[in-house]
Image (cartoon, rainbow, N blue to C red):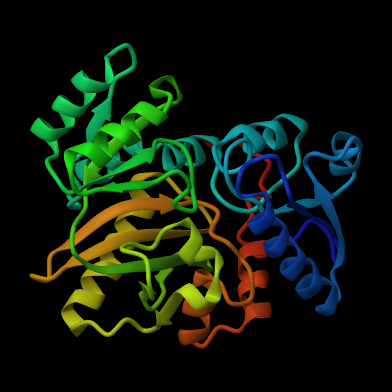
């Protein structure tokens, strides 16, 4: 692992923010802060929306990014930290931006030879009827409508019929960036990747099973009573290995650093389809990444140290 700047660095746990994932970020930030302080690190919590954030963050040695969503996970925050010369955890500007822009990341991952879901772009300037006709022709029903640059399943709508699709399209602002992809029946699986001493380590994949919703939607993710985890996933060994290999390949294809988490769907026929990558996975104690790390024999404090010490402290340029 890379050395820290000094024997007792001041670590800023950067959290909060103004995205729709603010509450999830605060949970991650609190857990990371408590872990760092319990391990003897000097740490402070900084919310990017605070009036003194700009002043306070310039006084730290490392920024530990426990934050998600727009203006945080999409390269904006990373670019700011690069500009003021503060090292940070996670991916750089380019990987963060492409990881957040789902339609872009799907193209890059597909070029790396990984199977991705079909994409139906929702073009601004078209009428609702024209968009519906386009999606029926390119994607077909059932399908899921998604924002291009959001996380946590925010805004996603499952449409099994034309009426539902028409209603969904009429409610969105196409100028904000939306797309659709087929809704595939199968097992939703996520797989984390950690940078361990310069080598990429895939974690045991985790099944994310909604208990009532038709898919792992925003409500299911936020309520422990509405989902179940299985980790390791109850899938054949060859499928598990394929998911892990694909998660590492997606991490590399997007140029990620430190850690990431890729989401997949395993169809009833055993086909593995890559959906998207999260360059700053949630870090609550019972979140996906911590659960997968625990299944690999990595406790929460170890996970936090791994992420902290994977930060690029060289001061050199990275995309």
For the point 85% across and 34% down, the residue is 54
Position of residue 233 in the picture relative to residue 242 (left or right): right
Position of residue 42 in the picture relative to residue 260 (left or right): right
**Residue nearer the viewer, 258 or 13:** 13
For the point 55% across and 83% down, the residue is 298
In the rendered image, is residue 198 in sight? no
**Residue nearer the viewer, 197 or 50:** 50
In the rendered image, is residue 270 in sight? yes
The quarter of the displayed image where residue 280 is located:
bottom right
Q: Residue 235, percent across and down? A: 22, 82
Is 134 situated above or below 140?
above
Q: Residue 219, percent across and down? A: 50, 61
For the point 43% across and 79% down, the residue is 228
Position of residue 51 in the picture relative to residue 108 (left or right): right
Q: Quadrant of the N terminus?
A: bottom right
Is 54 situated above or below 87?
above
Q: Residue 29, percent across and down? A: 73, 61
The quarter of the displayed image where residue 173 is located:
top left
């Amino acid at each position: 692992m890379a050395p820290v700047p000094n024997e007792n660095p001041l670590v800023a746990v950067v959290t909060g923010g103004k995205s729709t994932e603010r509450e999830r970020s605060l949970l991650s930030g609190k857990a990371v802060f408590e872990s760092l302080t319990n391990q003897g690190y000097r740490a402070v919590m900084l919310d990017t929306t605070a009036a003194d954030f700009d002043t306070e963050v310039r006084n730290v040695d490392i920024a530990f990014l426990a934050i998600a969503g727009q203006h945080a996970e999409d390269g904006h925050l990373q670019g700011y930290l690069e500009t003021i010369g503060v090292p940070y955890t996670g991916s750089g500007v380019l990987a963060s931006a492409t990881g957040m822009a789902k339609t872009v990341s799907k193209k890059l991952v597909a070029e790396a030879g990984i199977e991705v879901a079909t994409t139906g772009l929702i073009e601004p300037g078209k009428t609702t009827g024209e968009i519906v006709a386009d999606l029926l022709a390119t994607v077909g029903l059932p399908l899921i409508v998604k924002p291009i640059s959001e996380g946590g399943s925010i805004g996603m709508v499952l449409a099994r019929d034309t009426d539902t699709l028409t209603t969904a399209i009429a409610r969105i602002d196409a100028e904000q960036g939306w797309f659709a992809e087929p809704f595939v029946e199968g097992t939703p699986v996520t797989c984390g990747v950690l940078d361990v001493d310069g080598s990429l380590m895939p974690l045991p994949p985790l099944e994310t099973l909604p208990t009532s919703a038709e898919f792992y939607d925003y409500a299911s993710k936020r309520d422990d009573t509405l989902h179940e985890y299985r980790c390791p996933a109850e899938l054949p060994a060859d499928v598990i290995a394929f998911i892990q290999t694909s998660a590492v390949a997606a991490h590399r294809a997007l140029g990620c650093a430190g850690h990431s988490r890729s989401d997949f769907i395993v169809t009833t026929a055993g086909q593995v389809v890559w959906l998207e990558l999260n360059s700053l996975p949630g870090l609550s104690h019972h979140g996906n990444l911590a659960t997968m790390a625990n299944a690999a024999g990595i406790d929460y404090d170890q996970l936090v140290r791994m992420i902290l010490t994977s930060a690029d402290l060289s001061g050199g340029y990275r995309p």
